[in-house]
Image (spheres, rainbow, N blue to C red):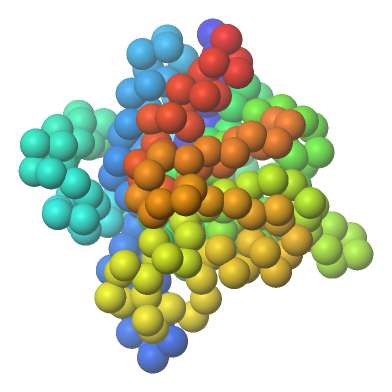
Amino acid sequence: MTSVLMVLSAADHWTLTDGTKHPTGFWAEEFVVPHDVFAEAGWDITVATPGGQAPTVDQLSLGISGGFPTKTRRIKARLDELTPSLATPADLHHADFDAFDLVFYPGGHGPMEDLAQDRISGKLLSERLASGRPLALLCHAPAAILAATAPDGSSPFAGYKMTGLSNREELLNRFAKKAPWLLEDRLKEVGVDYSKALLPLRPFTVVDRGLHTGQNPQSSEKLARQVVAALG
């Protein structure tokens, strides 16, 4: 059976430049929609977080920011059904990425707080990238590659074609004016060949060898179906 490790942030806030802690976590759609695509494909799904800590859903993703009420109600209902697997995740720090056919990182602002600085996650990502086996990162989740460094201090992801939440999309959030950094800027700084859709909030994905990335929550289903097809 095809297996996927879904790696979620364990952070429940994002520290802004003025020291305030903006409540956050993982973005509901970016977990639920890919999860259901993988389940539909008959895959075995394992959820992991740093330290095996139960993840926090960003409540904004269940409100108007997450879409129309009919959509967010459906996603909330699925989250409730998935509570058992979310309540007892595996510990990312002891995960064997080689045991999984796909490693998939959903986003939300949580990764900006913890995964972007998690050296164990960064090492695992570096090794996964070098293996050439499928790796997918969605929306803010590419922030996790910032913790990956080669022996010479460079990023192993330098030169790879990738996408992730754009500056324009981030700045649609009022609190983003106090953001300590923006994802698009950081990806470019480490040498990623970054691209994005012509219009914000539209589905957009990029594939470079075994690396699959999606720009925003609207890319959740497209990215998930893309990797299912790749592993088909």
- Is 121 rendered above or below residue 22? above
Q: Residue furthest bottom?
A: 18
Q: Quadrant of the N terminus?
A: top right
Residue 20 percent location from the top left of the image: 33, 84
Q: Is residue 39 visible?
A: yes
The residue at the point 71 percent across, 56 percent down is 192
The quadrant holding residue 128 is: top right
Residue 60 percent location from the top left of the image: 21, 58
Q: Is 46 situated left or right of 95 in this image? A: left
Closer to the camera, 161 or 13?
Answer: 161
The quadrant holding residue 151 is: bottom right
The residue at the point 37 percent across, 17 percent down is 39
- Is 169 rendered above or below residue 202? below
The residue at the point 43 percent across, 30 percent down is 222
Q: How many marks?
A: 0
Q: Residue furthest right?
A: 152
Q: Is residue 88 visible?
A: no
- Is 94 rendered above or below residue 199? above
Residue 13 percent location from the top left of the image: 35, 69
